[in-house]
Image: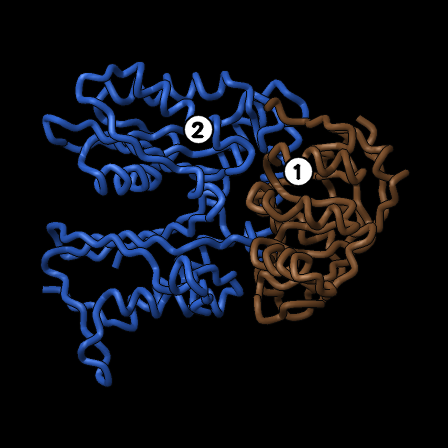
């Protein structure tokens, strides 16, 4: 067994929230820089260069990359032999409590915008802590606790969509819908995007794996060549739309399309598209 | 392309010089406002009450900034999605507002209201909140402090970069 103290999780999550909002991951930065080199539209090149400059300023001058420092979405893989040791004064505290305490501390000490309201329709009162975070926890073999925080903005999440297809629908029909969802998101969702696609599962699994797809490094492909080819074809078609950075024209509408799949019911073919803006902020740690 | 320098508040003559696709550098005062502030301003207009800010000639920047670091006027301050303000903007334009800054598309009613009221909508770079914050030299909350990041602020900006996304002639920079 491996015992991890509650306080250590709080401290780790706090730092991940801060790092995520100030430091653009290297693979995202590299993808923007590469796009700036291949882009043929001069004003699109200028926008891409300014995104690189934005990342430099964020890191060096300690200003968040984007004012929308997001809802903290936390993916946790807990090794089966890992136990969490609660604080002495609160023996009932769980790993979820530790994560939320870390998110609150990270957003407060990191001067990050707190964007969570307690309920959606009535008063929409800000919780002032950016909690509760959204936690996706699963048990895995081993003795490690791995935590990834995505600080995902509202603008791109708003343009994400889900649809149930017929199990006999062709790859082309599904690809066309995915392309439409992404191009219709357009300027509102801050292109160039990273697009996570969830194929299969059921209603909720499809959406969850579309977000999990965003955890992959840009440049990696689905291990199944059928889906890897589909990723390449989707990216090519979407970039041929000419939407471009900020929707102002250009060849760079997506930096990556990443598909994750799951087994599904014989009657079903659920598809989810999770749109992520170019400010694809996430950070990970393993304890 | 030549970049146009403009100073707020804007007059009809200023607005008429701006064409969709023009790149501009804005200096002067911007008001901030997003969803909740827009809703409140429109409720006051509907009730025939005075507004907490004079909109005449003003430009509203759709932004909810992150907290300022000590010694700085503001934190990250990039645009939020403009279309969420579509239901409210025509009413504010009819009450003197001359310009808005956000990211993304505006609906047909807003485009018609821009024409009718000789006003303009600018787009600036979504997701470049650190870069854009450098053009803001002063910020103070002037209404709805309880809304936190969504409060109405008065910003002083120098050479704030934007593109004319929708002009007063019904034209847009977007292909839709």
Give the side of residue B36 with respect to residue A85, left or right: right
- Whether B151 is drawn above or below A173: the answer is below
Q: Farthest residue toward the front? A: B47
Residue B76 lies, in percent from the top left, at 60, 55
Location of mark 2 (residue): A182
Instruction: Please state which of the two labelled residues, at mark 1 or mark 2, is closer to the viewer.
Output: 1
**Chain letter matching colour blue:** A
Say which quadrant the C terminus of chain A sits in: bottom left
Badge 2 sits on which subunit?
Answer: A
Location of mark 1 (residue): B110
Colouring of the image: by chain
Q: Residue at x 21, y 83 (%)?
A: A88
Disc 1 from disc 2: Cα separation = 24 Å
Q: Nearer the viewer, residue A266 or A103?
A: A266
**Chain letter matching colour brown:** B
**Residue A94 visible in the current orientation:** yes
Q: Farthest residue toward the bottom? A: A89
Residue A42 lies, in percent from the top left, at 67, 23
Residue A3 lies, in percent from the top left, at 16, 68
Badge 1 sits on which subunit?
Answer: B
- Label 1 and label 2 in one chain: no
Contact flag, marks 1 and 2 (Cβ < 8 Å): no
**Residue A26 visible in the current orientation:** no
Residue A215 lies, in percent from the top left, at 33, 41
Secondary structure at numbered mark 1: helix
Secondary structure at numbered mark 2: helix
Q: Give the number of the disc on residue B76.
A: none
Q: Residue at x 25, y 65 (%)?
A: A96
Give the side of residue A70 with respect to residue B24, left or right: left
Say which quadrant the N terminus of chain A sits in: bottom left
Q: Residues within 10 Å of mark 1 (few under 14, many from 20)?
A: many
């Amino acid at each position: 067994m491996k015992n991890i103290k509650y306080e250590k999780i709080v401290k780790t999550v706090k730092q991940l929230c801060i790092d995520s909002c100030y430091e653009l991951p290297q693979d995202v930065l590299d993808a923007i820089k590469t796009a700036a080199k291949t882009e043929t539209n001069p004003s699109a090149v200028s926008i891409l260069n300014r995104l690189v400059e934005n990342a430099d300023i964020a890191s060096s001058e300690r200003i968040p990359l984007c004012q929308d420092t997001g809802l903290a979405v936390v993916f946790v893989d807990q090794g089966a032999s890992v136990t969490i040791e609660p604080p002495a004064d609160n023996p009932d505290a769980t790993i979820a409590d530790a994560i939320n305490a870390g998110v609150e501390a990270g957003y407060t000490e990191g001067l990050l915008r707190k964007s969570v309201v307690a309920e959606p329709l009535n008063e929409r009162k800000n919780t002032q802590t950016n909690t509760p975070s959204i936690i996706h926890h699963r048990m895995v073999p081993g003795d490690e606790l791995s935590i990834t925080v995505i600080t995902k903005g509202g603008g791109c999440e708003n343009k994400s969509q889900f649809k149930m297809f017929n199990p006999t629908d062709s790859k082309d029909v599904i690809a066309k819908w995915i392309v439409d969802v992404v191009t219709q998101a357009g300027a509102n969702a801050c292109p160039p995007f990273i697009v996570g696609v969830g194929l299969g599962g059921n209603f909720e699994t499809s959406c969850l794996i579309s977000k999990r797809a965003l955890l992959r490094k840009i440049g990696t492909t689905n291990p199944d060549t059928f889906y890897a080819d589909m990723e390449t074809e989707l990216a090519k078609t979407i970039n041929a739309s000419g939407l471009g950075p900020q929707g102002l024209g250009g060849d760079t509408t997506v930096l990556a399309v990443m598909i994750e799949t799951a087994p599904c019911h014989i009657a079903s073919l659920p598809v989810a598209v999770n749109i992520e803006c170019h400010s694809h902020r996430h950070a990970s740690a393993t304890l | 392309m030549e970049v146009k320098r403009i100073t707020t508040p804007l007059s009809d003559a200023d607005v008429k010089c701006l064409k969709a696709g023009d790149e501009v550098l804005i200096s002067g005062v911007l008001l901030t406002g997003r969803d909740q502030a827009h809703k409140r301003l429109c409720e006051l207009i509907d009730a025939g009450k005075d507004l907490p800010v004079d909109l005449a000639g003003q430009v509203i920047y759709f932004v909810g900034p992150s907290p300022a670091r000590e010694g700085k006027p503001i934190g990250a301050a990039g645009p939020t999605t403009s279309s969420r303000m579509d239901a409210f903007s025509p009413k504010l334009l009819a009450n003197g507002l001359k310009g808005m800054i956000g990211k993304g598309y505006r609906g047909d009613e807003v485009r018609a209201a821009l024409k009718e009221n000789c006003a303009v909508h600018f787009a600036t770079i979504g997701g470049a909140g650190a870069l854009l914050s450098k053009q803001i030299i002063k910020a103070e909350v002037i209404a709805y402090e309880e809304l936190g990041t969504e409060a109405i602020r008065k910003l002083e900006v120098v050479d704030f970069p934007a593109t004319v996304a929708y002009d007063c002639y019904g034209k847009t920079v977007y292909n839709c």
